[in-house]
Amino acid sequence: MIFTRLEVCNFRSFRGAHSVDLYPDNGNGDVGPIVLFGGLNGAGKTTLFLAIKLALYGRATGEGGYTTSGYTSFIRSCIHKYPRAIVQPNTASVELQFQFGKLGKSYAYVVRRNWEVSKTNMKETLSIWENGARQTSLDQDEAQGLLNELIPQGIANLFLFDGEKIGLLAKDSSGDVLRTAFERLYGLDVAIRLRDDLQTHIRKNTTPLLNVAVDTAKIQTEYDQIKEELSEARSQLQRDNEMLHEAQVRREQLEINLRSQGGQWGENNHNYQIEATNRSKFLAEKKDSLRELIGGVFPLCLAQDTMRQLHKDVAADLEMTLQRHANGTVEHFADSIRVELDQKGKDSLERVLSGWLKSRVIQESIFDITPKTVARLEQVVSVDLFVTLRRCENLLESIVSDSNELDTLEQKLSRAPDKGTLKTEFDEFVQVNERISKLTRGIATLQTEMKAKLIHAIKLGSIISERHRDSIEQNQRCQSLEYAERTRFLLKTYRKTSILKTIEQLEREFDKEFCMLSRKDRSEFRIKIDPQSFQVRFQSEDRGEFNTTQLSEGEKHIYAVAMLIALAKTSQRPLPLVIDSPLVRLDSDHHKKLVENYFPYASHQVILLSTDEEIDVEAYEELSPRISRAYLIEFNDVEQESSIKEGYFLK
């Protein structure tokens, strides 16, 4: 793996976009592994170091990773603040380009992480290009997963060194830091997590096992019994259907015989007799009603014209009678007036009265009749005669119809054969009908019972299927738990074996590197790493046995560097090396050892971020044959921003 380019934009002290070429080849044929960045404290060296870590790991960059709110606050603090700007930038980005070898092929990757902040939140966008093609199918988590697969976060400390913190490895007397680095480097942390996950799986799935076989056997017995009962019921149903068919055929034969021999008349004889009796009764009642009508006004219906003329004459006679009474009333009234009038008035009255009476000729009354009698006569002529005539006609038609029907019934009764002649076949017909009814009811009951049994059998079959599935799942679960236990044992054995095998190689590599980097002759020094606790003990002929806390500060730093080199070499991972403040807190002897024996040969790509006191004139001259690129980071106090240019302090 080789870092080829780094770009930052509005990131911390860098305003706008700044891009640097990291490829360890200056184009002039000078192929050295070292890319050197120089800068005073606060110029921006750590910013570039942080940019590489952020590009690769994002939120997981901090010690133990950031919380959501902590990461948001951290990114807000990383966005460049330009003191003269009216509107401050709200976005920042880092971009890292690198080459990576997979399965014998080289791939070019571009990783860009962009941040946009507002008053309330922060949005991060991670984009990845592979061989120029953007991986748009990956969401943010999948993109980070791809980076973790290429460059696991657990090995970050093996190629991204912070000189200020590197000595912490030597100060850890418990062995926890070394164990964590060791496990992550060799992938043993994955094995440990897998063992823990398997333990969780075992705990969650270790529940009391059901006696599925016994329960299933009971249900299977009941199911088989119901199947046998259903089989018997089907046979019985088939027999009953056959007997029903035979009975129906026999009934059809008997019906044909009874019809051919008058059997149908015999069957209906009783009904005919009842109907004839009812008809006779209704006929007698209708005849009585007709007699009542004939005894009333019906005879007058025979002289309707005469009755209408009589009504006219009676009405006219009644009018003459009423007029006569009116004339008498007028004359009586005139007599009363005469008494009050003089002679002239009386003459006038006589003249008017005489003229009025002459105009009203009154004949003699023939009938002595009252108005009530005339009204009754009008009712008879206008209504009663018509209604009576219609009722008589309807009754007469009904009587004739009933008489004809009664004659028909009597003829049917007279033709009915003697019951004795058909008694045998009729009795058999009745018995066959009863048998058909009984068989039909039995078949219906049997079908209902079969339906209930079938539903119960289906339910039991479903339960048996579920129990079989439960049994299979239980067996699979037992097998899974067994495999999990065996896998946990294998992982434990694998971890123990891997640790024992690798620790020996790690100890040899450390002894060699520590001896080479130390300012004193440390050839007699040997270390022993406890495979359980990972505590490191030094063994020396002069000093005996001692731990890392008894080393000097410079020796602790050299110890940490040597241990990291040994870890990297034993892991056989060809990673670039990035060191921030590479020579901090080292005395001149250890300083020289690192410059001469470590930096030029530490990796195929070594990126150093140094002050002028760490890589000084002498160190620069020593490293220059191995330096392919050199940059100087300068900070402008007025503009409050950093810039990068080619060269170094001394050039």
Image (cartoon, helix red, strand yellow):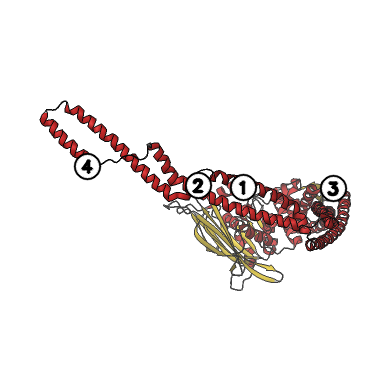
Q: Quadrant of residue 506?
A: bottom right
Q: Position of residue 584 (x, y in %)?
A: 64, 52
Question: Which tag is nearer the camera, tag 2 or tag 3?
Answer: 2
Mark positioned earlier in the residue sequence (2 or 1)? 1
Q: CA distance from mark 3 to mark 1?
A: 45 Å
Which residue, given by chain and number where applicable, does mark 3 sit on?
210
The alpha-carbon separation of the residues under discs 2 and 1 comes to: 124 Å
Query: In the displayed image of the protein, which residue is found farthest to the top?
Result: 339
Q: How busy is the neighbourhood of tag 1: few (under 14 within 10 Å), some, or many (20 plus)?
A: few
What's the mark number on residue 359? 4
- The three-letter code of the residue at mark 1 reads Thr
Q: Which residue is mark 2?
A: 299
Q: Please tell me which residue lies in front, 325 or 193.
A: 325
Residue 311, image x, y percentages: 39, 45
Q: Which is nearer the N-term, disc 4 or disc 3?
A: 3
Nearer the camera: disc 2 or disc 1: 2
- Cα distance, mark 4 to mark 3? 132 Å
Pointers 2 and 1 in contact (C-beta within 8 Å)? no
Q: Residue at x 26, y 33 (%)?
A: 328
Q: Between marks 2 and 3, how big is the CA–CA gap? A: 106 Å
Find residue 39 and report its image quarter. Answer: bottom right
The amino acid pointed to by label 4 is Ser
| Contact (Cβ within 8 Å) of mark 3 with mark 1 | no
Q: Where is residue 592 drawn, in percent x and y?
A: 67, 58
**In this rendering, position of residue 638 left or right of residue 76:** left
